[in-house]
Image: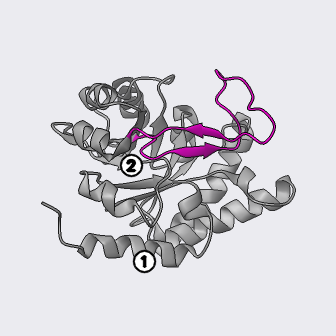
């Protein structure tokens, strides 16, 4: 099972300096706990600040680089410049095939190119098939479960006072459908918790991706409990 921690330093308390320090500590903890991939998703940072944060994150991961890779959200240029383990693309970014071609031209060796991961965000089975056709190494399908949003989607009006903004999940049936003939590992994202992660695996997910699940609480215990799900008998 693949475990994918997606970062958001703005969820930590304190000022910008404190939040940055807490994020880097959490990245180090995630690597030490055995999280497979960490996506640096600090979309509000300018290029230089993101590159500096990525370089520091890579130093924190270094003792565990045999099993943990850092991926950069959207910024293929920064991922290649700092020597990250890959890039995570959204629907508004380059196609996976284009990112792969650029990486092949930039990497010094064939082994570096083969080890560079290209992941893609998807929201439907058709998008999963498209990403797989473009050579994505994996996709993240979301949202599987309903999410309560801290801020409403850009396209919607602000919620009224006392109203909660929710994003409905597509469900594990959609995950199972996307997995049929996908030909690429699918990670479940969106409202994933210790209580429902097993249902994602039963629907064919290769692993789970999350922000809060990995960014809050006892991370080592979270990883231990998720790894224990691998030992459960498969459902028929």
- 174 vs 226, left or right, is left
Residue 108 visible in the snapshot: no
Tell me the SS state at disc 1.
helix
Q: Is residue 168 left or right of residue 140?
A: right
The answer to whether 9 appears left or right of 33 in the picture is right
Does the stretch in magenta take in 215?
no
- Could you give the CA–CA distance between mark 2 and mark 1, rounded to whole angstroms? 18 Å
Badge count? 2
Residue behind mark 2: 188
Mark 2 secondary-structure assignment: strand
**Residue at position x 62%, y 50% in the image:** 54
Residue neighbourhood size for the residue with mark 2, other residues' Cα within 10 Å, grouped as few (<14), some (14–19), many (≥20) = many
Residue beneath the point at 34% across and 43% down: 109
The N terminus lies in quadrant: bottom left
- Image spot of residue 88 (x, y percent): 47, 39
Q: Picture quarter containing residue 218?
A: bottom right
Q: Nearer the viewer, residue 106 or 143?
A: 143
Relative image position of residue 11 (x, y in whole percent): 72, 54
Q: Residues within 10 Å of mark 1 (few under 14, many from 20)?
A: few
- Confirm whether the magenta stretch covers residue 155: yes
Residue at the right extreme, as displayed: 15
Image location of residue 163, percent across then percent down: 73, 39
Q: Position of residue 84 (x, y in %)?
A: 50, 48
| Dominant secondary structure of the residues highlighted in magenta in the image | loop
Query: Quadrant of the image for the C terminus?
Result: bottom left
Residue 42 visible from this viewpoint:
yes
Nearest the viewer among 59 and 75 is 75
In the image, farthest residue toward the left: 236
Magenta span? 141-170
Residue 109 image label? none
Q: Which residue is mark 1?
A: 224
């Amino acid at each position: 099972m693949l475990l994918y921690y997606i970062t958001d330093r703005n969820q930590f308390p304190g000022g910008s300096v404190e939040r940055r320090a807490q994020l880097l500590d959490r990245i180090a903890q995630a690597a030490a706990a055995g999280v497979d991939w960490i996506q640096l998703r600090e979309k509000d940072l300018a290029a230089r600040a993101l590159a500096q944060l990525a370089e520091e994150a890579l130093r924190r991961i270094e003792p565990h680089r045999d099993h943990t890779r850092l991926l950069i959200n959207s910024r293929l240029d920064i991922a290649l410049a700092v020597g990250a383990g890959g890039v995570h693309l959204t629907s508004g970014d380059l196609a996976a095939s284009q990112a792969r071609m650029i990486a092949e031209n930039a990497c010094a060796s064939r082994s570096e190119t083969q080890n560079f991961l290209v992941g893609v965000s998807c929201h439907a089975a058709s998008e999963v098939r498209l990403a797989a056709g473009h050579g994505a190494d994996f996709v993240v399908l979301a949202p599987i479960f309903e999410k309560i949003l801290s801020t409403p989607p850009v396209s919607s009006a602000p919620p009224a006072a006392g109203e909660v903004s929710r994003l409905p999940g597509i469900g594990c049936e959609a995950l199972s459908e996307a997995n049929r003939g996908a030909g690429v590992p699918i990670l479940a994202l969106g409202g994933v918790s210790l209580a429902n992660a097993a249902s994602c695996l039963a629907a064919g997910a290769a692993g789970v991706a999350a922000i809060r699940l990995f960014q809050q609480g006892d991370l080592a215990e979270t990883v231990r409990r998720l790894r224990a799900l691998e030992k459960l008998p498969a459902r028929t």
